[in-house]
C-alpha cells in the first residue's frame, strides 16, 4: 500500500454513528482526511463535508484506490463480511463493536489482515470516556489496595421495541449483550485482564422482545477478583456505573457519557469544553491510608476525547505501535458473548 501523508478515510455508513462518533473526529485529527462515505438513499454528507465522495454501495467505496482506511460502522451482523472485503482490498479497517459476532470470525479477520499486510482494529471508544478514565486512574493509583469486587453497569429505559432491525430481531449480533455488553466487557478486560471463568444470565422482559434486554455476567479471576457486569433496558433509575471495592478502599462513579451528549447537541471535538464533565459529577473515593485513617474525597475526571482512539489508530498504521485493544482481548470478549 502506498504511504500517504494523511490517512485517507472512508465510512461505510453515515447514520448516527458516522455523523456523531466518526466523521467529527476524522475531521478534527490532523493526520486523517475524510474523503468518502456510503449513503444508500439520502445524500446529505456534502452539506457538512463539502467535496466528500458519496457512494451508493460498500463495493463502490472499497474500489476507491484513494482510500487507505475503512471504518466499518454498519449493522452488527455485517461487520465480518465488510471488514473481510476491505482487507481483501488491501485497506486498513476500523471496526465498531461488536467486532464480529463470533470469535472464529474475529480470528479469521486477524489472519486475513496479516496476510494482506494491513491492520484490523476494534473501535472501543468507551475506553476514552471521562468516567472510565477516572476509574482507571483510581485503580492505577493503588489507593484501593487489591481489587476484590467490581460492578460495571450500563443501564437505560427503553420499554418500546426499537426500529433498528439489527438490534431487535433475532439475528447474529443482535440483543443487548452485543450492544452495551460488549462495551462493559471491554472495559473490564482492559482494566483487570481476561477472566478465568464466567457465568451469564440473559433475559427478555419487554413485551414482544425477540432479543435479550437484560444481561448479567459474573466474571471470576484466578486471583479471586469477582466482577459483575450488568446491563438492562428497563432501569428507570440507574445505579452507579462503576463500583470498585478493594482491600483498602472503594470508588463509586456515575456514568456521565458527556461526549455523546455534547456531540448530539452539535459540539465539535475541538470546541472549548468538549469532553469536560458537568460540575457535581465527581466520583467518590473512600480509602484508608498507611495509618488506617479513613479518607473520603471527590475525584474530578479530566477532560476526555474519542480523538484518543483515532490517535491510537494513527500510531499503529503509521508508526506500527501496538494498538491498545489487542487480539487476545477481542477473542476473549467474543467467547463470553457467543457462549
Image (tube, helix red, strand yellow):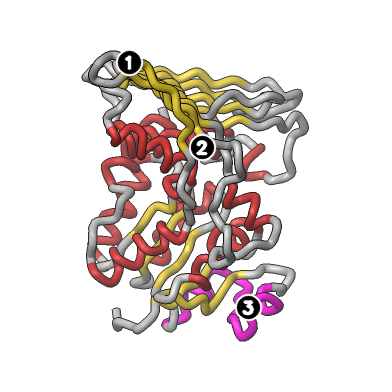
**Residue 134: percent from left, percent from top:** 43, 39
Q: Earlier in the sequence, mark 2 or mark 1?
A: 2
Q: In terms of depth relative to the viewer, which is nearer, 306 or 77?
A: 306
Q: Residue at x 42, y 46 (%)?
A: 127
* Disc marking residue 293: 1
Q: Is residue 58 magenta?
A: yes
Q: Earlier in the sequence, mark 1 or mark 3?
A: 3
Q: Earlier in the sequence, mark 3 or mark 2?
A: 3
**Residue highlighted by disc 3:** 49
Q: Residue at x 60, y 37 (%)?
A: 280
The answer to whether 330 appears left or right of 52 in the picture is: left
**Residue highlighted by disc 2:** 178
Magenta residues span 45-65
- Marks 2 and 3: in contact by CB < 8 Å? no
SS at mark 1?
loop
Q: In terms of depth relative to the viewer, which is nearer, 99 or 124?
A: 124
The answer to whether 142 appears left or right of 335 in the picture is: left
For the question of whether residue 210 can be seen, the reply is yes
Relative to 176, residue 75 above or below: below
- Marks 3 and 1: in contact by CB < 8 Å? no
Amino acid at each position: 500500500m502506498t504511504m500517504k501523508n494523511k490517512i485517507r478515510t472512508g465510512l461505510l455508513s453515515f447514520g448516527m454513528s458516522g455523523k456523531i462518533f466518526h466523521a467529527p473526529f476524522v475531521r478534527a485529527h490532523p493526520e486523517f482526511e475524510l474523503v468518502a462515505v456510503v449513503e444508500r438513499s439520502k445524500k446529505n454528507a456534502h452539506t457538512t463535508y463539502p467535496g466528500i465522495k458519496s457512494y451508493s454501495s460498500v463495493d463502490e467505496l472499497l474500489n476507491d484506490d484513494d482510500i487507505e482506511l475503512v471504518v466499518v460502522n454498519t449493522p452488527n451482523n455485517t461487520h465480518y463480511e465488510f471488514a473481510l472485503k476491505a482487507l481483501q482490498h488491501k485497506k486498513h479497517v476500523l471496526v465498531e463493536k461488536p467486532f464480529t459476532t463470533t470469535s472464529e470470525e474475529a480470528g479469521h479477520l486477524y489472519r486475513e489482515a496479516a496476510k494482506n499486510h494491513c491492520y484490523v482494529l476494534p473501535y472501543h471508544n468507551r475506553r476514552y470516556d471521562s468516567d472510565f478514565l477516572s476509574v482507571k486512574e483510581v485503580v492505577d493509583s493503588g489507593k484501593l489496595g487489591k481489587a476484590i469486587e467490581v460492578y460495571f453497569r450500563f443501564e437505560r429505559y427503553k420499554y418500546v421495541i426499537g426500529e433498528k432491525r439489527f438490534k431487535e430481531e433475532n439475528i447474529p449480533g443482535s440483543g443487548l449483550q452485543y450492544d452495551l455488553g460488549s462495551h462493559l466487557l471491554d472495559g473490564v478486560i482492559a482494566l483487570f485482564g481476561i477472566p478465568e471463568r464466567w457465568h451469564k444470565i440473559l433475559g427478555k422482559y419487554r413485551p414482544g422482545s425477540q432479543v435479550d434486554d437484560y444481561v448479567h455476567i459474573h466474571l471470576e479471576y484466578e486471583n479471586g477478583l469477582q466482577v459483575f457486569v450488568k446491563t438492562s433496558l428497563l432501569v428507570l433509575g440507574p445505579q452507579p456505573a462503576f463500583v470498585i471495592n478493594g482491600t483498602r478502599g472503594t470508588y463509586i462513579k456515575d456514568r456521565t457519557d458527556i461526549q455523546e451528549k455534547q456531540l448530539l447537541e452539535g459540539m465539535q471535538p475541538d470546541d472549548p469544553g468538549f469532553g469536560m464533565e458537568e460540575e457535581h459529577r465527581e466520583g467518590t473515593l473512600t480509602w484508608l491510608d498507611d495509618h488506617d485513617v479513613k479518607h473520603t474525597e471527590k475525584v474530578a475526571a479530566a477532560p476526555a476525547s474519542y480523538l484518543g482512539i483515532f490517535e491510537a489508530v494513527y500510531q499503529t498504521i503509521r508508526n506500527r505501535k501496538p494498538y491498545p485493544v489487542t487480539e487476545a482481548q477481542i477473542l476473549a470478549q467474543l467467547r463470553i458473548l457467543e457462549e
